[in-house]
């Protein structure tokens, strides 16, 4: 719990674009989820929650510059994870990403 809180504080004080780049590397690929070699569910859930915080801090243009290529493929892959808490975190992150990016 303390580690999660420390990580969340770090995500708030670091530049959001840099955080998104770091977190994108922890997101799985489709193949990793299908083969069961994806990151542990606890780690993946924490990664997605931190990414959610970062998305809230980013301006629409910078979010749109990284989301399609770096974030969305990994989030869609994580949505196929076996653990429901990971899938739930992904849905909340996608909603925040959509709100931060804007409708149009």
Image (cartoon, rainbow, N blue to C red):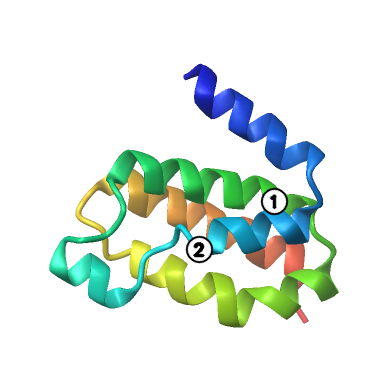
Q: Quadrant of the C terminus?
A: bottom right
Say which residue appears at 84% left-offset and 75% top-offset.
61
Q: Nearer the viewer, mark 1 or mark 2?
A: 2
Q: Residue furthest left?
A: 35
Is residue 104 shown above or below 95?
A: below
Tell me whether the residue at label 1 lies in contact with that at label 2, contact meaning CB atoms closer than 8 angstroms.
Answer: no
Say which residue appears at 18% left-offset and 71% top-offset.
34
Q: Read off the residue under disc 2.
A: 25
Judge left or right: residue 86 versus residue 1. left
Is residue 29 shown above or below 86?
A: below
Residue 9 or residue 56, whichever sits in front:
9
Instruction: Residue 52: give x, y in percent of width and height.
Output: 60, 50
Q: Read off the residue under disc 1.
A: 54
Cα–Cα span, label 1 and label 2: 14 Å
Instruction: Residue 71: give x, y in percent of width and height.
Output: 55, 70
**Which class describes the residues within 10 Å of circle 2: few (<14), some (14-19), or many (20+)?**
few
């Amino acid at each position: 719990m303390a580690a999660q809180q420390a990580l969340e504080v770090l995500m708030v004080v670091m530049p959001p674009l840099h955080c998104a780049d770091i977190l994108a590397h922890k997101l799985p690929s489709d193949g990793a989820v299908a083969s069961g070699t994806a990151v542990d569910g606890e780690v993946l859930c924490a990664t997605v929650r931190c990414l959610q915080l970062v998305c809230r801090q980013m301006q629409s243009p910078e979010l749109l510059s990284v989301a399609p290529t770096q974030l969305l493929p990994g989030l869609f892959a994580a949505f196929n994870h076996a653990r429901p808490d990971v899938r739930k975190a992904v849905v909340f992150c996608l909603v925040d990403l959509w709100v931060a990016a804007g409708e149009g």
